[in-house]
Image (cartoon, coloured by chain):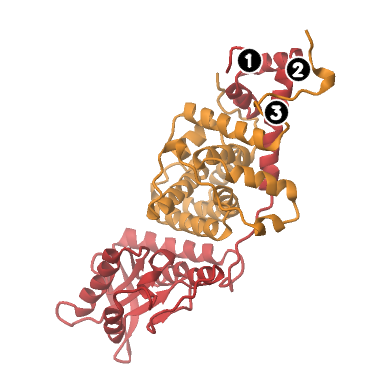
Amino acid sequence: MLARRRLDTVDSTDKSQRGVTMRVLAGISQKRLFKTILANSRDRLYRMAFSWTHDPALADDLVQQTCYQALRKQRHLRDIDAADAWLFRILANCLADHHRARREVLSGEEFVIVEKWTPEHATQEDQVAQRVRKAVSALPLAHRQVVTLVDLEGFSYAAVADILDIPVGTVMSRLSRGRRALRDHLLDVNARGEVNLPAKVRRIK
Amino acid sequence: MTKDELISDEQLNAFTDGELEADEENRVFTLSEENAEVDVRLCQHRKVKELVQHAYRDVPKPRRHDNKGGPGKNLLSLAAAAVLLLAVGLVGGWTVSRSLDGGSVPLVAAATNPDTLLLHVASSDPMRMQQALDRAEALMAGPDGATSPRVEIVANEGGLNLLRSDMTPYARQIRRLAEQDVLFFACSKAIERLEEQGVSVQLVPEANTNYSALDRVVHRMQQGWTYEKI
């Protein structure tokens, strides 16, 4: 059974929300608070957009579009403590709009965008990071979004379900399939997907 | 979960992500201590999570040629625009100054009948392009000539074909509108991106390329212009 998010769990989302609450208590106006949250969220939104697209220019456009829409729609945000998830939901919608505008019809989790991987992606110094990004980029977008929202932002499964407008069970199954694919790409598993146990702990009947 | 597995991937993920209740966590701890395969699978889940976190700790920043104001410039502009939008929403109109026959004349405009309009073309669908141009033309024609509306048409990457001389079917209408002082802006960022991809971008002579689409939109919104996305 899934646990409700515990108050003592420290991750970026909780830190942000706790900070928000503190500032509300300190009497800072809602509008000013929202602008602060938005400014502080920009880098995180960009990182998420980049992990979804692996295209710096497109990611930047998506973040700008997200900021623009957030500012226009801020009166719809009733609970300032929910601003974090709300911003990421707008980002997800902006990406969906982007694909829709290019007539790339999303058909649930079967939809796959295999990002074009060019040599310039491999010019970075961190080969491990490049290998992981390549594996992430090969995931179906639906799986990629769930994996990155959980792993990079520490969103709870319930929050991811809200951001992507899908059931929690779907979040769990997409996460499971996404991580399994990454494991197969990145870790030492054999061709049948079985775990290669270290010899010293392998049990022999 | 196969019948040979003691615990499913979903449960291991939930454990890894701190989503399990305490009793379920205890069960996973016990299983991982007693069963080497569960322990290895658990380690793999954690390692995959840490690899993903590592891979995106430092991501490449976008190259912005128009970032003259330093980091946060656009966001500050957007924030200012939002404040303005809020004011518009509250008051239902706004006051602007503009030059008319050499003088500065205060205007009070209703949001539904703007004298200053920025049309954002984000699609290369010919019907949308036509719609934007017709909208500008109708406003410039005006019902009685009592006011002199100001209109700008901004094309971002999606709508850039409107202003590409080798693509647009509306060069004549653009010229006609430009003669009525309608200004056209082609997104400088979109052009730069296309040229990086080896595309030679030829624009109609009426197109300005001094701003990115977003910066122009924000600039005009700060001044109280009405924004319409086509």
**Residue B227 rendering spot, x and y as whole percentages:** 34, 66
Is label 1 in contact with label 3 (beta carbons under 8 Å)? no
Residue under disc 3 on the same chain as residue under disc 2: no
- Picture layout, residue A69 above or below residue B160: above
Q: Residue B122: percent from the left, percent from the top?
A: 37, 63
| Rendering colour (chain A) | orange
Local SS, label 3: loop
- Identify the element where label 2 is drawn: helix
The residue at the far top in this view is: A205
Mark 3 residue type = Asn
Position of residue A119 measured from the top left corner of the image (x, y, whole percent): 66, 57
Amino acid at circle 2: Ala
Of the residues under marks 2 and 1, which one precedes in the sequence?
1
The quarter of the picture where residue B186 lies is: bottom left
Residue at (75, 51) in percent of width and height = A126
Mark in front: 1 vs 3: 3
**Residue, far right:** A200
- Most extreme residue toward the bottom, as rendered? B102
Return the residue nearer the eye: B172 or B103: B172
Proximity of marks 3 and 2: CB atoms separated by less than 8 Å: no
Q: From the viewer's perspective, is residue B208 above or below residue A20?
A: below
**Relative depth, front residue between A203 and A179:** A203
> Residue at 49% of width from left, 56% of height from top?
A62
Which residue bears the numbered disc 2?
A: B36
Q: Which mark is residue A190?
A: 3
Point 49% across, 42% down: residue: A112
| Residue at the extreme left of the image, as rendered | B144
From mark 2 to mark 1, how far is it between C-alphas? 12 Å
Colour red, chain = B
Q: Which subunit holds the residue at mark 1?
A: B
Residue found 50% across the figure and 52% down from its top:
A34
Report whether A93 appears left or right of B103: right
